[in-house]
Image (cartoon, rainbow, N blue to C red):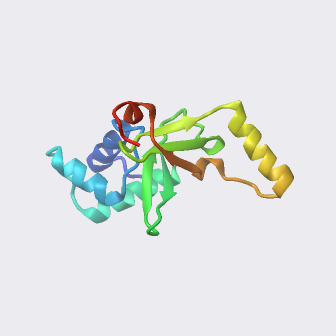
Amino acid sequence: MGYNTQAKKVVADFFASNPDKQFSAEQVIENIRARGEKVPGNSTVYRIISAMTEDGELARFRTDDAGYLFQYMGPSCDCENHFHMKCVHCGRIYHLECEKSEELVEHILSDHGFRINSGMSVLYGTCGACAEAGRR
């Protein structure tokens, strides 16, 4: 899509500088404004996020309250083929790329007839850094 404008650069730069976190569109707007950067309007940011999602630059995750969070994928991310883990304390996203998770996906398909969309699957818990800091 043709959003190669200054506004798209600001939004894309924001996501690229926070690759391990997910944000709602509203959080993107708030964070960009808090950094002192000008964003023309909320609807422009929504359109840019939508276009970036369609182009594969962002992944979209559904929230419990029927909203969406977006995460930067970058040019080399293969996020459709692995699980993600999200720390409930710091919000960091980790990519779970290991043989055991692939075995789980295969087991669920072969034994239960259910095809998992790994790229949309997020496991929630506490990361090592937060656990060391005493957060559980």
Decide: is 37 above or below 40: above
Q: Quadrant of residue 130?
A: top left
**Quadrant of the rendered image containing residue 13:** top left
**Whole-percent x and y of residue 37?**
17, 46
User: Above or below — where is 133 with respect to 136?
Assistant: above
Q: In this view, does 82 lie to the left or right of 94?
A: right
Residue 37 visible: no
Return the residue found at the far right.
Answer: 110
Q: Where is residue 129 in the image (x, y as percent from the top left)?
A: 39, 31
Query: Left of 85 or right of it: where is 133?
Result: left
In this rendering, the count of numbered labels is 0
Q: Nearer the viewer, residue 77 or 110?
A: 110
In depth, the one of 57 and 134 nearer the eye is 134
| Residue at x 18%, y 51% (from the top left corner) | 33
Q: Who is closer to the viewer here, 4 or 16?
A: 16
In the image, what residue occupies the spot 33% across and 36% down?
17
Q: Horizontal and vertical percent for residue 56?
A: 53, 47
- Residue furthest toward the left? 36
Q: Point out the image quarter for the C terminus.
A: top left
Q: Which residue is drawn at 37% across and 37% down?
A: 16
Instruction: Give how far across and how far down residue 90 sits, in percent.
Output: 35, 42
Looking at the picture, tell me which residue is in the foreground, 129 or 66: 129
User: Can the viewer see residue 119 in this picture?
Assistant: yes
- The structure residue drawn at horizontal position 41% and vertical position 52%, both measured from the top left corner, is 2
